[in-house]
Amino acid sequence: MRRARRWLIDYTGVAVGSAIVALALDWFLVPNRIAAGGVSGFATVVHHVFGWPVGVTMLVVNVPLFLASIRVLGLRFGVKTIFGTVVTSVLVDVLAPYVAPLTRDPALASIYGGVLAGIGIGVTFRYGGSTGGTDMAARLLNRLTSISVGRSLLIFDGFVIALAGVVFNPELALYAFLSVFVTSKAIDVIQEGSTYAKGAFIISEKAAEIGEKILYELERGVTALKGQGLYTRADREVLFVIVARHEIHRLSSLVHSVDPKAFMVITDVSDVLGEGFRMNEMGLES
């Protein structure tokens, strides 16, 4: 029963993400000739040149990629990937007659289309699927050559965007690059969550006193790490603490009230698991 429920949730999530990607294509990218890389970008170019349906073209391109992936990689790239790709391709064509473009401004289309596509792709990733396309081609190229997956994706997306620049115009290719960038950032937010916490490394000769204040005034846990200055070879403690975004100023003031010469490194934290923290919709609570 639990396994069936998990299966239903996963495939529903992949379907929802695929639907969001389809809307991004129909609302923003395809009508404005924004070929933002990948199979969908190639299908966008083909659609405007030959009039072929975008979804059908995506399926035609993906079928040989599926077959090659099964032969070279086995089924480990996932049945959910096939499901997500088919759902996306079908919905792009099914929704197209009923969904009017929301803008004819290519800048707005590239930004909002990129955000929406990134959200959709990120959702499918969160549920173990994908919308297929060049990620399969990249994995194949990686297996057959020494080229990394990331570089392979860059090659395929660059080719599609360059093709759009030749077929349409260079300006639209620039908008396509913008859309790819926005999409990647949106995927990261969905995959990793927005930055809702900060981590701080604190180096000071008064580490013990600073640690006490963090524990009892800021009421945050703090860990003392053993460190050594490579120049002086002197042993020292390095404090590590995680705080909510709104607490970072208070932490800085507290540290420098004890030791104005303290050295602090503050970094973003996208996920915190453990006692003392829980994530709400807007930030981190204790």
Image (cartoon, helix red, strand yellow):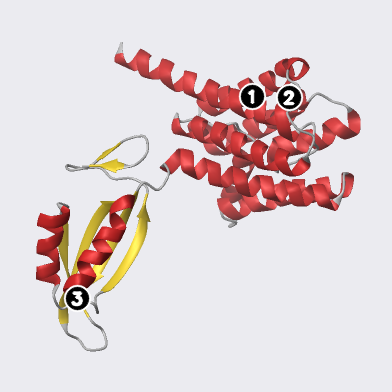
Kind of element beneath mark 2: helix
Residue at point 84% right, 34% down?
46
- Residue named by callout 2: 55
Q: How far apart, in angstroms, are the residues tagged by discs 1 and 3?
A: 57 Å
Residue at point 82% right, 45% down?
164
Question: In the drawing, what numbered circle is on residue 259?
Answer: 3
Question: In the drawing, what numbered circle is on residue 18?
Answer: none
Q: What is the x, y in percent for residue 106?
A: 77, 41
Give whichever of discs 1 and 2 has the lower sequence position: 2
Furthest-bottom residue in this view: 232
Kind of element beneath mark 1: helix
Whether residue 139 is visible to the viewer of this picture, yes or no, is no
Left or right of 41, for residue 256: left
Q: How far apart, in angstroms, are the residues tagged by discs 1 and 2?
A: 7 Å
Q: Is residue 25 above or below residue 261?
A: above
Q: Quadrant of residue 119?
A: top right
Give whichever of discs 3 and 2 has the lower sequence position: 2
- Residue named by callout 1: 88
Between 104 and 137, the one nearer to me in the picture:
104
Q: Is residue 267 above or below residue 204?
A: above
> Could you tell me the amino acid type at mark 3?
Asp
